[in-house]
Image (spheres, rainbow, N blue to C red):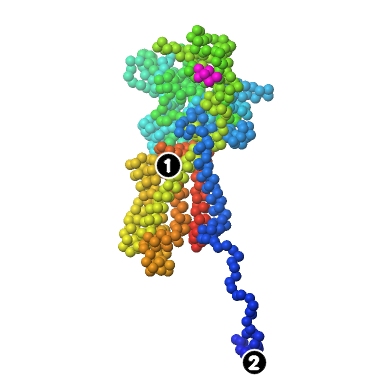
Amino acid sequence: MDKKEYIYVDSSGIEHKIALEESNFELKQQNEAIHDQKFKTKPTTFFKDALKRFAKNKSSVAGGIILGILLVLSLLIPVIDTNNIDVSHPYELFLAPKAFNAGTGFWDGTKKIENAPCDTSKKIVDEAGNVFYYPFEANYPKRAVSKLTPAKVGYLEDATAAANYGYANIICVKSTATDIDITDEEAISEYATVFYSQNYAFDLTDTYKVTLTVLDEHIEGFARCDYRVLIDYKAKTVDERKTVTLKEFSDDSKLVAGAVNDTISTLKTKKLEVSNFLEEVAADPDVAANGLENANLRIEMLPVANSQSSLAIRSIIFEAENDTSIPFTNLGFDNANQMILKQPSARGYWTSTGTKKLYHGLGYVCSFVYDTYEAAYGVQERTLSLSLVNEYVEKGWISSSFNIDDALYNDAALELDKYYKTLKTDLTDKYCPIVSMKEITVTTSGGITAYQFICDVYGYKWLGYAEMPKFLFGTDSTGNDLLKLVFVGLRTSLGLGLLTFAICFTIGLVWGSICGYFGGTVDLVMERFTDILSGIPWIVIMTLCILNLGSNFFTFILAMCMTGWIRTASITRTQFYRFRDREYTLASRTLGAGHPRLIFRHILPNAMGTIITSSILMIPSVIFSEATISYLGLGFQDMHSLGVTLSQNQTYLLTNPVLILFPSAIMALIMISFNLFGNGLRDAFNPSLKGSD
């Protein structure tokens, strides 16, 4: 080949020359075989590739792991935990969560109790002179109380505690009258709250004094009002009742509407003393001539216009110089709590046309650490029947050398010390509950004699435990283990979700396949039916099913499945429209493939990834729906679920928050894990949908 030149001009107008030689056109690798290089990696499948993509999504992997752990726990814990959650355990109510021994200060089954009412009948004074009172045994057994603080005077915030243990409460008398003319005397008499005393036959020759102490402050939520004190009386054989005013409404009372939240330390009282208050009554001619039949003390309030009025009375004290026939403390009171606990038939009972309630109960309070497990399972007094003691003898827990029946038959009034000499408990046996015998009671009725043994027993052994139990998350209002209750409920909720998903997925897959594959009139008719059904709120369908079929597991599945398949059907229909006109589908149809082959071999396998990953989120949706309907009071009646547990414990959110927080945490965890896991599957099987809702 001759030497030639190739000349060209670039965009800038510059001419370039390239020399062409024969060697430029010679073939290379003339002695080597030219072929494709061998693959150095193994071929993969769509599933393996999707699994790799899923593994790269750390949050979805974490969600899957948590989901697996919860699933395993929901299967294992109900089997391992022996607590029977289908019955009530009355001696094990509201036990605190416990994982460690008492005294560690954390997760040890104890509670810090603040300002509990004290039992002042027994005083304990330490070397430093500090006075201690234990809380009432009925509320907090002494064996479970530790780190007791010295008693102090405090206000009992709890209304029940104030009613039972307070000794210097205030009676708040509240009027229901509003929007009246306070200058109208008749309106005041008609609408004002009136506070009466009982009748009492006063000795007109004696000198009497009444001391009324009221709170000169506001009561929260009500307006403080002025008041006047009157005596109503009636002379013997005279029908007319007359009134004497002991204290008139003050012109400068400064009635105040609204509310002021005063602290206890700022509460002030004002006393009204009226001595020899029957002088004017004795001067009445009818009384002088006929004598006094009865006299009533009345306290009349002056309502505040356009507001609910209140008068806080701390005490009413009667005194007389010579009359001692009836103690005046029975007519008045210096302990508002004792007065308000009186029955209407009791002497000295005061009543009101308004409402009469305790306010700011005063009493001795203390703080301490309360071991709920020692209270429930520690050494305590129990009454055992003769048959139960005989059962212990038969089991070898009590020395069999002693025959209880013979001993009691020979001497029904067997003394306790003699009984001790022959009755021995085998304390080495871990199941024997008896610690000591305290008393034997013998009762005879209808010729039948019954024997009862009052003993100190180990509470946990008496309840059938070999050792003192621990409940990681405490017990609920029925004494059931919350941990087992939650995971049994989780198992039910997961079973409900999975079964509902399987049924809805199957129905939706068939329905959507038919709609999407055939299209046209078939699709139009089926879609209109779906639109009508989806327009009915699920809560209506659920409620109707429960009311007609009962609140059980299968009713919930039926209600969920009636509309739950619609989303899966919609997704399947969309995927069939996407794949039914692809080239490989048309080629198969041309070669004679029938409808079943086209649907199940060509279209459905390509759409299955999107359909499954989009439908799997139905499971947490079903669980949440069940919890919602249970929280509304329409939950399962014959089994446990997370929704039922939350519904039953919602009233204890403030007093025992763990009863609602722990099930809520499991519910939140299962919902989040399912969403993370489902989103990860969606992104792995269909990367084009990554990041979409």
Image x and y of residue 658, in percent? 53, 38
User: What is the quadrant of the N terminus in the image?
Assistant: bottom right
Q: Which residue is mark 1?
A: 630
Image x and y of residue 217, in percent? 51, 33
State which quadrant residue 265 falls in.
Answer: top right
- Dot 1 and dot 2 residues touching (CB under 8 Å): no
Q: Is residue 518 magenta?
A: no
Q: Which SS class for mark 1?
A: helix
State which quadrant residue 53 falls in.
Answer: bottom right
Q: Which residues are magenta?
A: 390-396
Q: Residue at x 37, y 43 (%)?
A: 555
Q: Is residue 153 visible?
A: no
Q: Which residue is mark 2?
A: 2
Residue 450 vs residue 34, the one in the foreground: 34
- Left-right relation of 245 to 8: left
Residue type for callout 1: Ser
Q: Residues within 10 Å of mark 2 (few under 14, many from 20)?
A: few
Residue type for callout 2: Asp
Image x and y of residue 264, in percent? 55, 33
- Left-right relation of 578 to 262: left
How far apart are the alpha carbons under marks 1 and 2?
96 Å
Q: Is residue 349 visible?
A: yes
Q: Residue at x 41, y 44 (%)?
A: 629
Q: Residue at x 48, y 33 (%)?
A: 84
